[in-house]
Image (cartoon, rainbow, N blue to C red):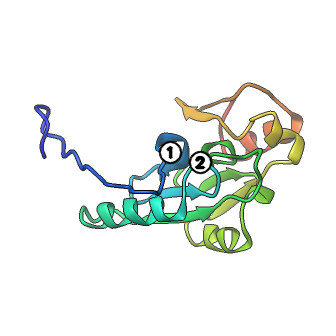
Amino acid sequence: MVSRAGLSIIELDFGDDYFEGHGDFLWHPDGSRIYAGYGFRTTRGGVDKFTAAMSKLGIPVIPLQLVDPFCYHLDTCLCPLSDEAVLIYPQAFSPSALNVLPKYWKRIHELTADEAHKFIGNGIVANGRYITPYRTAHLDAILSEEGLTR
């Protein structure tokens, strides 16, 4: 189906599966792929159904299993800083998810548990700034390395 704005609308029947949506999927900054988290509010089956739909549009989806209930959404533990750098809380991911990330990111910066639990990874980059609710010296060092400010 095509909307009045010319956008494609895809309807998916998730059946007994769930796909939470925005909190569990993030675009790579260059638009080349989507990262999809599952484990708490999204099921693996939901990600698989979403992946099948996106493959018809030529958009790859990278499934990432979340294992820390505090990081119930992907956007609580993974934040792209640029096309090459990402901020993550590694304990939020399964070992297989952690093994996948270096295939897509040249630089992976790790948050501490305290930083992750304060939702520092739930930020966004806009106009060369990283917007997040809290600040630490560790975060400031990462942002400086990446040429970003807070």
Question: In this image, 64 relative to 21: left or right?
Answer: right
Q: Closest to the observer: 20 or 30?
A: 20
For the point 54% across and 48% down, the residue is 24
Q: Mark 2 belongs to which amino acid?
A: Arg
Give 5 or 72, whichever is nearer the viewer: 72
Number of numbered callouts drawn: 2
Say which element carries label 2: loop
Quarter of the C terminus within the rendering: top right
Q: Do the residues labelled 2 and 1 touch (CB within 8 Å)?
A: yes
What distance separates the C-alpha of mark 2 from that of mark 1?
Answer: 6 Å
Q: Residue at image x 28%, y 65%? A: 58
4 or 42: nearer the viewer: 42
The spot of residue 27 in percent (x, y) is: 46, 50
Name the residue located 76 percent from the left edge and 52 percent from the top edge: 89
What is the number of the mark on residue 124?
Answer: none
* Residue that appears at 55% across and 66% down: 104
**Residue designated by label 1:** 20
Whether residue 66 is visible = yes
Image position, residue 30 (x, y; %): 42, 52
Image quadrant of residue 5?
top left
Determine whether the residue tagged by mark 1 lies in a helix, strand or loop: loop
- Sequence-first tag of 2 and 1: 1
What label does residue 41 carry, if any?
A: 2
